[in-house]
Image (tube, rainbow, N blue to C red):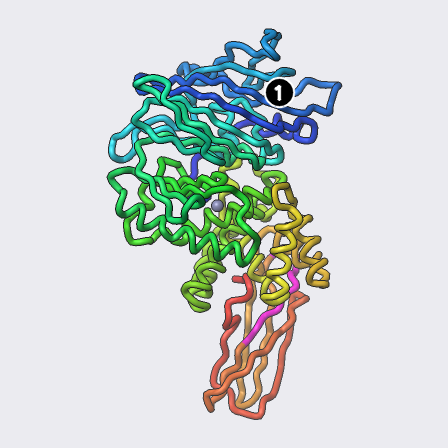
Amino acid sequence: MLRILILYFFLSPLFIISQINSLDVTNYHFSIRVNDNHDTIDMVEKISFNWNNPETTPYLNLKSINKEGKGMRVKQVYSEKENIAFHHKNDTNSLNHLTIEYSGVPIDGLVIGKNKYGNRTFFGDNWPNRAQNWLACHDHPSDKATVSFSVQAPSHYKVIANGIFQSELDISPQEKVWNYFSDIELPTKVIVLGIADFETTWPEKNTISSWVYPENKQAGFYDFDLAPSILHFFEDYIAPYEFSTLANVQSTTRFGGMENAGCIFYDENSIDGTRSCEALLAHEIAHQWFGNSATEIDWPHLWLSEGFATYFTLIYQEKVKGKEFLQEELKQDRNQIISFCKKYPNPVIDSTQKDLMKLLNANSYQKGSWILHMLRKKVGDEVFQKIIRTYYSTYRLSYASSADFEQIAEKISGIELTQFFNQWLRTPGIPKLSIREYIQEKTFKASITQMQNKAIFNLSLKIQINFKDGSSTLETIQLNDRLTQFEKKYSKKISSFVLDPNVELLFE
Ligand SMILES: [Zn+2]
């Protein structure tokens, strides 16, 4: 997703981690009923799961009623019509059954309110683990399941959800039921549902649809018309699109955009009729491969989702707007990383940060993206693309850790990359270089010191030497120590030099 604001948020993730290897939900079927008179939702959920830890009892995450009276109350839990005992306390729900009935006003997760035109809307917004506010689920990215929705809502609405649209049935003069089914397993963070008065169109028949507020019909259809070319660009570069359809949806998500699987939600203000949201679309569409299909196994590996989406947006923009555009964007991102690293002491793989919202930072996004850029410069365009394709084909519809990606990168490139990944992913901060240069006629000398307090990095620094006759040459200096000296005499007189002329190194 792309941030528009950062909120402090904490939902005890330790509870979840304790059962991630034992509980495997295979399917959720959610029947949900909403109405226009109040914000209470009624849920009937059928869940199928495997549990391979007989010593203990599995539980689902579901937010209980809070002091304001919001939250979910479980009414009954049963297996094949036989009522069984259950416990629902401390936001967990121990279980050994198939059907759960519950209702309440969601504290969060399903945002029921008014859009910017004052019209009533219902938008799921689950990232990172807010699904448990309205869905009884195993709320962790490492447990994917197929999912279907039956949504009963007033007839004037249109309903969008993950997966394939199955049917829309009139059940009374006032209400309809919409059915959607995703046969692809999804992590809860990107399971979604949207209910609003939408106008819809299909920029690509049967595959890509646009869902916008009636007030923004013209502008929204025009902006979202970019989706097919972006999607096909990524298909060519990475692999075929995994999901059956792609809906681009105007919504009230708290993020700039949220990459819900096959059903992307964009902030309602991102539509302006000028296609200024092109990079946002590219970012969220790239997530369909990285994050939604090949999913990070746990939160510390978030860069596999956000860093990839950020860099693939740049790769798309490089194709559309050229190399100079890419370099300007990388420079801006580098500046953001420099100022972020001064304030934040943790590395990209950040297992100490328990406030998941705070992982939406320049480490996960811009630095993750820069690491992919440096890898590409190290191995070359062709090998880089092969690494990406192999990583994706290996971990598509599954889970990966940073080490899984590193292993693929080493295997495909044939280069030992332990130091490269350790210094960029597991070491906080970035290298800070102090350079003292000396130019005399045809001689160029430089003393380069790594000034950062912590570890010494292994770096390739490129320097462009410009000559007085207008020509230039490119030198690569290997920096493996605290201090590196460089001296070279040329046949022509030197006029000036440029550090890292092609924007290939992350340093201050
Ligand atoms: Zn993102």
In the rendered image, residue 144 lying in the magenta stretch gets the answer: no
**Image quadrant where residue 122 sits:** top left
Q: Is residue 431 visible?
A: yes
Q: At 41% from the left edge and 50% from the top edge, which residue is drawn?
A: 227
Placement of 135 over or under 6, stated as above or below: above
**Image quadrant where residue 372 sits:** bottom right
Placement of 86 over or under 141, stated as above or below: above
- Ligand 1 within 8 Å of disc 1? The answer is no
Q: Is residue 301 visible?
A: no
Looking at the picture, tell me which residue is in the foreground, 448 or 329: 329
Label 1 amino acid?
A: Tyr
Q: Secondary structure at mark 1?
A: strand
Q: At 57% from the left edge and 32% from the top edge, which residue is drawn?
A: 146
Relative side of 201 to 506, left or right: left
Percent position (x, y) of residue 101?
51, 14
Q: At 46% from the left edge and 24% from the top edge, which residue is drawn?
A: 150
Q: At 50% from the left edge and 42% from the top edge, which residue is drawn?
A: 244
Looking at the picture, tell me which residue is in the foreground, 240 or 507: 240
Looking at the picture, tell me which residue is in the foreground, 237 or 280: 237
**Image quadrant where residue 296 sits:** top right
In the rendered image, residue 458 lying in the magenta stretch gets the answer: yes
| Residue farthest along the right direction in this orientation | 55
Give neighbour class at mark 1: few <14, some 14-19, many 20+ (Cα, 10 Å). Answer: many
Percent position (x, y) of residue 133?
48, 24
Which residues, given as a range, are shown in magenta? 453-463
Placement of 438 over or under 143, stated as above or below: below
Percent position (x, y) of residue 28?
56, 26
Q: Which residue is mark 1?
A: 59
